[in-house]
Image (tube, helix red, strand yellow):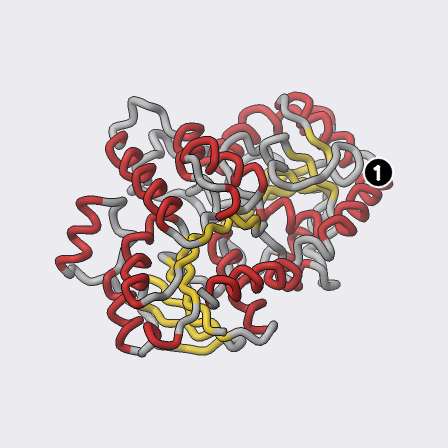
Amino acid sequence: MHITIFSFHKPYPPNHGVARRVWGLASSLVQLGQEVTVFYTGKGQAASIGGVRLHGVPRTGALANRIFDAVFVRYHNNIDFYRMFRRLGLDRTTDVLQYEFPYLFPTAALARRHGVPIVLDAHGVEAAFNREVHIENSPSVAMLKKSEFTEWLSLRFSDRVFACSKADAGKMHEIYGTDPRKIAVVPNGVAQSFFEPIEPHEFHKPTALFVGSALHPPNKYAIELLASTIIPRVLKSRKDAQFAFIGKHAKPPYPWWMSTPPPKLAGRKGVLDFAEVSAVEPYMAGADVCVAPIYQGSGTRTKILEYLACGKAVVTTSKGIEGIEVMDGRELLIRDEPDEFADAVSELLGSPKKAKRLGAAGRRFVKGRYDWLSIAKRTIPVYEELARR
């Protein structure tokens, strides 16, 4: 079976959440004997990595792209995907076309003209995300309305939909009336490298780690909360401790939604700021506690699954574990109030035995449920059913 994927984001190297999902599923499908081709917006010659065929397709100023920008969310659609799709003869050999995020629906819908069924890989629920993160009097309300209109179209006219969690599937039905029978839950997963033994980074002090790009609104809010409330409270009770941050910095010009930049972390007492690193696994392996004070968004948080896969004690929120069937005190700690969150971090930094017990339970929970190969196996019947139509 041949699956073609359209993605605005470059999937390899898988160094951020979207890339990890696209690459994790694509590479695992290849391991299971499927043929996978991925088109992404960007420069780059055609390449085959791990059996996945990758095509970087620059976005041109074609009239169709300008029309897409005027009617739908800007910059995401790429008529050149479709042109390359046809030029390579994939309109005749593709069994299923999958597109990442609803914004690419207009481009993906062109493939349906050739009888190719299309699958939306939703990554989250954009309407729910916008309503939680973006204020109603935003200067970009028009863009938010375009976003929700495009999401409605994609959910209405795609042949199947992949949701990251049961919670997201419920939101799709509640907000848009999407038929639950059309939705398959395909959670985020964890790469095999997070389960394998690795030389840990040596922090030299009890360390709590946060991983996440400041360019993602829920992460920006988490960084602000850590800097203003959680870190000072932890360091007051644990003077020997420190916090480490890994993730892309926000630099001018800032995104339209970012009214104020996130706080600068470098140089703060008790804070290490690594920004971007080639691999996060050694840092997770070396940390004593991993944190995710997430209060917004949808989808399943890849960072929490990766923390657990590394066998780390985790402190997060009810929102952070949305869509992940863990229990407070069994696989991790769930604390929604910032002061209680900070106290839980302090407790685990001072209780290595409890941290080790939680970490071991979390690792057992993730393995076999959230490794990408197991997840990919569950998607194949969906693709096969579509291919038979």
The picture places residue 207, in percent across and down from the top left corner, at: 69, 42
Up the image or down, 182 lies above or below 60; here it is above
Residue 99 left/right relative to 233: left
Q: Nearer the viewer, residue 23 or 220?
A: 23
- The kind of residue tagged 1 is Lys
Residue 5 left/right relative to 253: right
Q: Nearer the viewer, residue 2 or 270?
A: 2
Up the image or down, 146 lies above or below 231; here it is below
The picture places residue 246, in percent across and down from the top left corner, at: 55, 48
Q: Secondary structure at mark 1?
A: helix
The picture places residue 70, in percent across and down from the top left corner, at: 17, 45
* Callout 1 crowding tier (Cα within 10 Å): few <14, some 14–19, many ≥20: some
Residue 342 left/right relative to 186: right
Residue hosting label 1: 354
Q: Nearer the viewer, residue 6 or 138?
A: 6
The answer to whether residue 140 of the structure is visible from this angle is: yes
Up the image or down, 309 lies above or below 352; here it is below
The residue drawn where x is 65% and y is 53% is 283
The picture places residue 115, in percent across and down from the top left corner, at: 34, 66
The residue drawn where x is 39% and y is 62% is 117
The residue drawn where x is 51% and y is 63% is 385
Q: Quadrant of the C terminus?
A: bottom left
Q: Quadrant of residue 62?
A: bottom left
The residue drawn where x is 63% and y is 21% is 337
Q: Quadrant of residue 255?
A: top left
Residue 276 left/right relative to 200: left
